[in-house]
Amino acid sequence: MCEVTKNDPRRVPPAGSDREREIWQIAIELDKIREEWGSPILITSWYRPQAVNRAVRCELSVH
C-alpha cells in the first residue's frame, strides 16, 4: 500500500473499505503483468483522495 499512497497517511484509504480492496485487486493484477513482462511497471500517479486534492488545490481528479 505504501507505493500507492506514497507513504502519506492522508492517502491511505480506511481499512476494510471498498477503496482499499479495489487498490489491492489492481495491485495484484499489476503484479501478474510485471511477472509476465519480467520488468517493473512505472506508475506515476495512482490514488489521491479528495482531501489531498484540496490540499494541493486540485478539486477534480484527472485520473
Image (tube, rainbow, N blue to C red):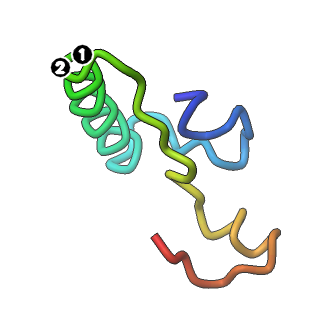
Q: Residue at x 49, y 44 (%)?
A: 43
Of the pair 41 and 58, the residue shown nearer to us: 41
59, above or below 46, in the image: below
Q: Tag on residue 62?
A: none
Q: Which residue is mark 2?
A: 36
Residue 53 at x, y = what percent?
69, 70
Label 1 Cα neighbours within 10 Å, binned few <14 / some 14-19 / many ≥20? few
Provide the secondary structure element on which disc 2 rests.
Answer: helix
Residue wearing tag 1:
35
Q: Are marks 2 and 1 in contact (CB under 8 Å)?
A: yes
Using the image as rendered, state which of residue 8 and residue 35 is in the foreground: 35
Specify the quadrant of the image occupied by residue 37: top left
Kind of residue at badge 1: Glu
Q: Residue at x 59, y 61 (%)?
A: 49
Horizontal arrangement in the rendering, residue 47 relative to residue 30 (left or right): right
* Image location (x, y in percent) of residue 24: 34, 33
